[in-house]
Amino acid sequence: MQLRKFFLPFVLAALILAGLSSCQSDGSGQSSVEEAPPKEKIPVPKFERDSAYVFVERQVAFGPRVPNTEAHRQCKQWLVDQFKGYGAKVIEQDFQPITYTGLVLKATNIIAQFNPEATRRIVLAAHWDSRPFADSPLSEERRDEPILGADDGGSGVAVLLEVARQLQAHPIEMGVDLVLFDAEDYGESGGERAETYALGSQYWARNLHVSGKQRPKYGILLDMVGARGARFPQEYYSVQFAPQVVRKVWKLAQNMGYGNYFVNDSGGGITDDHYFVNTIAKIPMIDIINRQQGPQTGFGEHWHTHNDNMDIIDPRTLRAVGQVLLAVVYREANGDF
């Protein structure tokens, strides 16, 4: 019994010394314990403006993408096929909202997920439907006819399609959700009820496609981001709900040489899709949206008119927005944003 009492401490001491010696330096000043190499950072890819321009053309070729029309149905299938072709997991979130006129719409939010299992993720969004009326105060003809929506709808979708193409070509580990909201532009003209607009984002915000652990860290909404001479001030609700994201995005854009687009002026408050994402889903989301100081509408002169066609689209504007968006995504994935 006495021998066992003294033998056990000697054994323990030997084991401890052996463990220490295995972790000693190999003489180079470095520990001999192998460490995982640092993760290689993925460079920000180039945003191809001509590709984005073609994506706008393809949408416009379907005609006005108004819910309950054949053009809307055909464009939806094309968008779903495009995202699937770029390797995304696509969710078609069907819903049937009732408009302010009492009309029931057959609508679909299109969700393209990259790395759907990742818990660290962000969301990028735009609306893909177009306005069923040309009801701008500046519109003088065919006011009851739907508009093509090359900029108002088409441009934001085109930028996200090109982002999807780059995500396939230059994979990252972070999760990215590209969400195309439907039924955004079927709201009451001049009405006081803001909730008649953005029906798709309201539905999505109440029916998130991700679990609690996968909720996006923040989001960026694109609306009217392709027009010639576009100007993106800092929208009021974006600053209120996601001030840090606004500051980072605008500073990044200006450092990249796009300060003529991303200006530090206040853009006023707009009840756009991001408003409902912020207030219902509680996901901080900013809105990159073209605001003009001249027209009485506060938007470009083509807004909600039949002049919102391919003639207004400028590939340079698409590139400015798209390159900034890619920089945000890849910097966030690399831990540099």
Image (tube, rainbow, N blue to C red):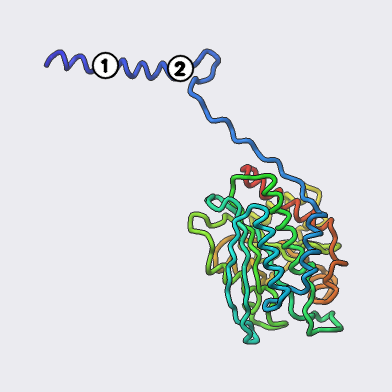
- Labelled disc at residue 265: none
Q: Secondary structure at mark 1?
A: helix
Between 118 and 120, the residue placed more toward the observer is: 118
Query: What residue does disc 2 label?
Result: 24
Residue 3: x percent and y percent? 15, 13
Residue 182: x percent and y percent? 65, 71
Q: Secondary structure at mark 2?
A: loop
Relative to 296, is 334 above or below? Answer: above
Query: What residue does disc 1 label?
Result: 11
Number of numbered discs overlaid on the protein picture: 2
Q: Amino acid at mark 1?
A: Val
Residue 198: x percent and y percent? 64, 73
- Give the residue displayed 53% in from the left and 51% down from the top: 117
Q: CA distance from mark 1 to mark 2?
A: 20 Å
Residue 101 in the figure: left or right of residue 299: left
Relative to 225, is 36 above or below? Answer: above
Residue 32 in the figure: left or right of residue 180: left
Relative to 30, is 179 above or below? Answer: below
- Give the residue displayed 63% in from the left and 74% down from the top: 107
